[in-house]
Image: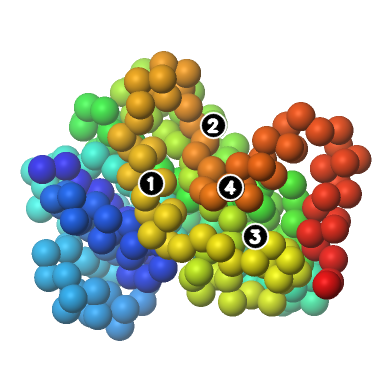
């Protein structure tokens, strides 16, 4: 039975992903820093393996992965690096603690997760590392500058590890949602107001599922990035073919108040 470990899995996209894979018969690990949310998940889905995880702590990653793989015979088919936070507001208006929290969770946490999972993924042929990126990594986004920059990091890490770990038969991919109907979308940002919140956690979960069940062509071209939703696909493609001043203008308009 294949297995997936999901960080930040007790709510939102993480929980939707857990349900998607669980419904297909996978062994699912839901790990989160929120103990109350974990209890609720375990009550609804006793078949899930759950545990506490602060992604900022390397020792907790090691403990959580050891705990999960003890239930799978050491097998780890997918690590879903899902945990993340967003604090909206101009950089000069948010606290240093908010800046640090986003970098610690969205950057350090993702990196420590990949590092800790590597021995398990290497030991499982055809394994996957899935990193949750964001459409905010297409072009730097005002009002969520730290979060946007963190997701640029996630994209760079994904691309580097895709090359670095290819010889180990580990496929590394990034998922690119725009605003989804989760707690992150509660941030008072102009881009969310302008573009709307059109993506559900279930749509992102389905994209995660697609990414770890790639078509032959996807594997042949080493597809690394998976956009979620039409808006993300259009914005991403436009950024690649349009001149920088046009891309900048589009993002400026998106970020303006209505």
Q: Residues within 10 Å of mark 2 (few under 14, many from 20)?
A: some
Q: Residues within 10 Å of mark 1 (few under 14, many from 20)?
A: many
Q: State the CA–CA distance, disc 4 to disc 3.
A: 22 Å
Disc 2 target residue: 159
| Residue ID at (69%, 77%) | 188
146 left or right, relative to 35: right
Q: State the CA–CA distance, disc 3 to disc 2.
A: 19 Å
Disc 1 target residue: 208
| Residue ID at (66%, 53%) | 136
103 left or right, relative to 63: right
Q: Nearer the viewer, residue 60 or 244?
A: 244
Of all residues, the one furthest to the bottom in this rendering is: 36
Of tags 4 and 1, the one toward the viewer is 4
**Residue at disc 2, secondary structure:** helix
The disc, 1 or 3, on the residue closer to the chain's N-terminal end is 3
**Residue at disc 3, secondary structure:** helix
Location of the C terminus by quadrant is bottom right
Of tags 1 and 3, the one toward the viewer is 1
The answer to whether residue 59 of the structure is visible from this angle is no
| Residue ID at (87%, 41%) | 246
Q: Nearer the viewer, residue 249 or 124?
A: 249
Judge whether 144 appears above or below 110 on screen: below
| Residue ID at (42%, 34%) | 172
Q: Position of residue 162 (x, y in %)?
A: 46, 28
Asked if the residue under mark 1 is in contact with the one under mark 2, i.e. CB atoms within 8 Å, the reply is no
The disc, 4 or 3, on the residue closer to the chain's N-terminal end is 3
The disc, 2 or 1, on the residue closer to the chain's N-terminal end is 2
Judge whether 120 appears above or below 179 on screen: above
Disc 3 target residue: 147
**Residue at disc 1, secondary structure:** helix
Disc 4 target residue: 230
């Amino acid at each position: 039975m294949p297995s997936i470990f999901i960080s930040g899995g007790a709510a939102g996209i993480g929980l939707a992903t857990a349900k998607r894979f669980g419904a297909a018969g996978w062994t699912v690990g839901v790990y989160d820093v929120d103990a109350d949310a974990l209890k609720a998940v375990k009550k609804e889905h006793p078949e899930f393996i759950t545990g506490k995880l602060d992604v900022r702590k390397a020792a907790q990653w090691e403990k959580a992965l050891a705990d999960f793989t003890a239930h799978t015979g050491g097998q780890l088919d997918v690590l879903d690096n899902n945990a993340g936070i967003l604090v909206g507001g101009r950089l000069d208006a948010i606290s240093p603690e908010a800046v640090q929290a986003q970098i610690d969770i969205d950057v350090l946490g993702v990196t420590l997760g990949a590092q800790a999972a590597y021995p398990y993924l290497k030991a499982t042929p055809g394994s996957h590392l899935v990193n949750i990126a964001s459409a905010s990594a297409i072009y730097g986004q005002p009002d969520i500058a730290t979060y946007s920059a963190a997701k640029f990091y996630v994209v760079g890490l994904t691309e580097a590890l895709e090359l670095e770990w290819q010889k180990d038969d580990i496929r590394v991919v990034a998922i690119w949602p725009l605003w989804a109907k989760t707690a992150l979308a509660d941030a008072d940002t102009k881009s969310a107001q302008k573009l709307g919140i059109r993506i559900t956690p279930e749509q992102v979960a389905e994209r995660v599922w697609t990414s770890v069940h790639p078509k032959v062509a996807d594997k042949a071209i080493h597809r690394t990035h998976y956009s979620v939703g039409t808006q993300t696909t259009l914005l991403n493609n436009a950024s690649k073919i349009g001149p920088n001043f046009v891309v900048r203008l589009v993002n400026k308009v998106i970020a303006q108040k209505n």
